[in-house]
Image: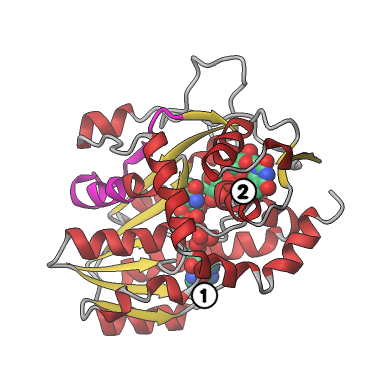
Amino acid sequence: MRILVTGGAGFIGANFVYYTLKNHPDYDIICVDSLTYAGNLSTLQKALKSPRFTFYRQDIRDRDGIDAIFQKERPDAVVNFAAESHVDRSIETPELFLQTNILGAQVMMDACLRYGNVRFHQVSTDEIYGDLPLDRPDLLFTENSPLRPSSPYSASKAGADMLTLAYFRTYGLRATVSRCSNNYGPFQFPEKLIPLMIANALEDKPLPVYGQGLNVRDWLYVADHCRAVDLILEKGEPGQVYNVGGHNEMRNIDIVKLLCAQLGKPESLITFVTDRKGHDLRYAIDPAKIRAELGWEPQTPFAEGLKKTVRWYLDNRPWWEQIISGEYRNYYQRMYGDR
Ligand code: NAD
Ligand code: TDX
């Protein structure tokens, strides 16, 4: 099996590369990533030593470039992780999100069709469902919930998700879609909640919680997401959508307090800042379908996953220190400077 992974130098893509190298000794992996600010080749350092791993620095929006890679590598399957992934950045620069997340996905699907209907998996997100009220814990997103995206990021992901299902119906593309909840774990870029709070706390900097920190996210350890995508590739049915989540809803403020406790830092570092525009209140996934049809269950309890994640950031300081010392400083100043 030759599997082409886009966005493999980012957080989940890289975890998927390592997961696949370890669990499928008979697979070759072709990684395509344009190395935006969020992509980091040092993340793939170990993978690059494997003869079963090939890396291309390539933008998925560039049809000719993608075509040349398909021509040379002839993949059997494609998993599309590549995306602009940060909601706050999408509020600043929506256009880039539409280009990469929708048109880039289309380029990948067109290539799959041209090279013999290659199996395609689109990594979508629970954010496309919009949000749920805080006072209705009984409500969960199912695969049939309406799509009501709130941010340019989630609207662009909804576009790609719908386009994937349209390519299945119109052209018969052998495609599946997964809609996963918030991931956490090693190699997550420090602009996202958990690594941002870890990095700031370790440097005794303020911990900027949006609004009152009461928004709820449904957290899943990244390896559990990787296993779900792997299962869908192996056993999923083309044309189907699978929700992925672990029934692990947490308020932001509680996560930040847990991190303070684990790092031995005072809660007085917590600073409440101006809320995100259009901020979704609550996400909660019903994973009944993937459990019943593919036998997927999350394996990492949150307490264990969070400990492992904190340990990883403590043990891999050079990885994130290098990131936050560069262009990230300008971003941080722009985003949090006078918030
Ligand atoms: P990330 O931002 O860490 O990584 C994205 C990767 O895509 C980077 O390596 C970047 O260089 C690459 N990329 C961006 N634009 C590209 C382009 N035009 N061409 C080629 N490569 C490009 O993102 P992530 O958190 O790892 O998310 C991966 C995927 O999973 C995304 O599609 C995201 O929407 C989805 N997702 C993420 C989460 C989460 O909690 N992080 C949850 C559900 C779904
Ligand atoms: O500094 C912060 N302070 C804060 O309170 C940051 C960065 C975030 N937050 C809040 C906003 C959210 O309620 O924490 C929550 C999580 O924020 P993010 O880490 O930005 O994630 P979210 O917006 O929930 O989106 C994530 O999950 C779904 C990923 O970034 C998406 O790519 C994925 O699709």
Q: Is residue 133 above or below residue 317?
A: above
Q: Is residue 37 above or below residue 87?
A: below
> Colour scheme used in the picture?
secondary structure
User: Mark 1 Cα within 10 Å, few/some/many (few <14, many 20+)?
Assistant: some
Answer whether residue 223 is magenta in the image: no
**Residue 132, position as x, y percentages in the image:** 58, 25
Magenta region, residue range: 226-248
| Pick the front one: 67 or 172 | 67
| Element assignment for label 2 | helix
Q: Find the residue positioned furthest to the right.
A: 338
User: Mark 2 Cα within 10 Å, few/some/many (few <14, many 20+)?
Assistant: many
Q: Which residue is mark 2?
A: 197
| Mark found first going from the N terminus, 2 or 1 | 1
Residue type at the position of mark 2: Met
Residue 315 found in image quarter: bottom left
Label 2 beta carbon less than 8 Å to ligand 2: yes
Label 1 beta carbon less than 8 Å to ligand 1: yes
Question: Residue at 55% across / 45% down in the picture?
Answer: 263
**Residue 82, position as x, y percentages in the image:** 47, 63
Front label number (2 vs 1) = 2
Judge whether residue 189 can be spotted in this image: yes
Q: Quadrant of the N terminus?
A: bottom left
Residue 208 found in image quarter: top right
Residue type at the position of mark 1: Leu
Q: Which residue is mark 1?
A: 35
